[in-house]
Amino acid sequence: MRMKLVSLICLLLPFTGWSQLEKIDTKKGNEEYRSGRYDEAVKEYTKALENDPEYMEALFNTGNALQQMARRLQEQAQNAQSEEEKKELMEGAKTASEKAASQFASVAKMAKTNEEINKAQYNLGNARLMSGELEEGIEAYKEALRKAPDDEDARYNLAYAQHLKKQQEQQQQKQDQEQQQDEQKDQEKKEQEQNQDQQNQEQQQNQEQQQPQQMSKEEAEQLLQALMKQEKDLQEDLKKKKNRKAQRVKIEKDW
């Protein structure tokens, strides 16, 4: 009986030691975090989560480390030497914040107490705000305040996020108005060009109507023949009238 009991204890020891590894790795991660080595802290927290994917302290601290990495990238972007470098750093900060938000969202779902939920939602709001997701950040701050109505930090950040959202809406409204004005100007310009084209066409048509039409060679020959015949007929008519006049005058003299 004693041998069986000893054997059972031996079997349990490895599992007991393994169950403490996430705490050890998390502690190492905390040390790296306090030293400002946030990327190393994330690696240690990841080791802890490999042992226990639902270890909330490691999840929460991973989110914090990622947030600090995002802030550092944003600071570097302010001193970037080129727009390309600045864009790359800002994209990295946004990605880090999105990953942090995922960690805090997981903690918020797993949390049991109001205090835990408040902390997770508050940090989730910060991560959403940093990644530009204002509406989602506002909702996270509201949830944090539901669990802790006296949380002044959450109240302040909520007001700030709402202010940013209002500014964004006003800017979008201004851009929409400018776009509408540009479209209206383009439409008016297009109508003016169409009216001008129509006026030019009408003017051209009037000029064509006023200008004599150019005759073809056949028409010119026909007209010339007609004029010659008319001239011939006129000469013959005049000759006849002259003869009649001469005759009439001669008779009158004889009387």
Image (cartoon, grey):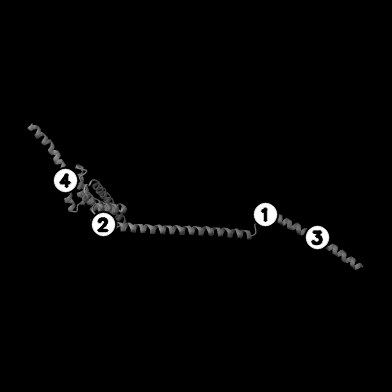
In the picture of the structure, the residue carrying the numbered disc 2 is: 155
Assign a secondary structure to mark 3: helix
Q: Nearer the viewer, residue 205 or 121?
A: 121
Say above or below: 98 vs 244.
Answer: above
Give the mark, 3 or 1, whose residue is nearer the N terminus.
1
Amino acid carrying label 2: it is Arg
Give the mark, 4 or 1, whose residue is nearer the N terminus.
4
Cα separation between marks 2 and 4 = 33 Å
Classify mark 1: residues with Cα within 10 Å, few (<14), some (14-19) or many (20+).
few
Q: On residue 217, which mark appears?
A: 1
Residue 60 placed where, x, y %?
A: 22, 49
Q: Which of marks 1 and 2 is in front?
A: 2
Q: Which residue is drawn at 15% across and 39% down?
A: 15
Note whether residue 146 is visible. Answer: yes
In the picture of the structure, the residue carrying the numbered disc 3 is: 237
Residue 32 placed where, x, y %?
A: 17, 51
The quadrant in which the N terminus is found is top left
Cα separation between marks 4 and 1 = 109 Å
Assign a secondary structure to mark 1: helix
Amino acid carrying label 4: it is Lys
In the picture of the structure, the residue carrying the numbered disc 4 is: 23
Q: Nearer the viewer, mark 2 or mark 4?
A: 2
Q: On residue 32, which mark appears?
A: none
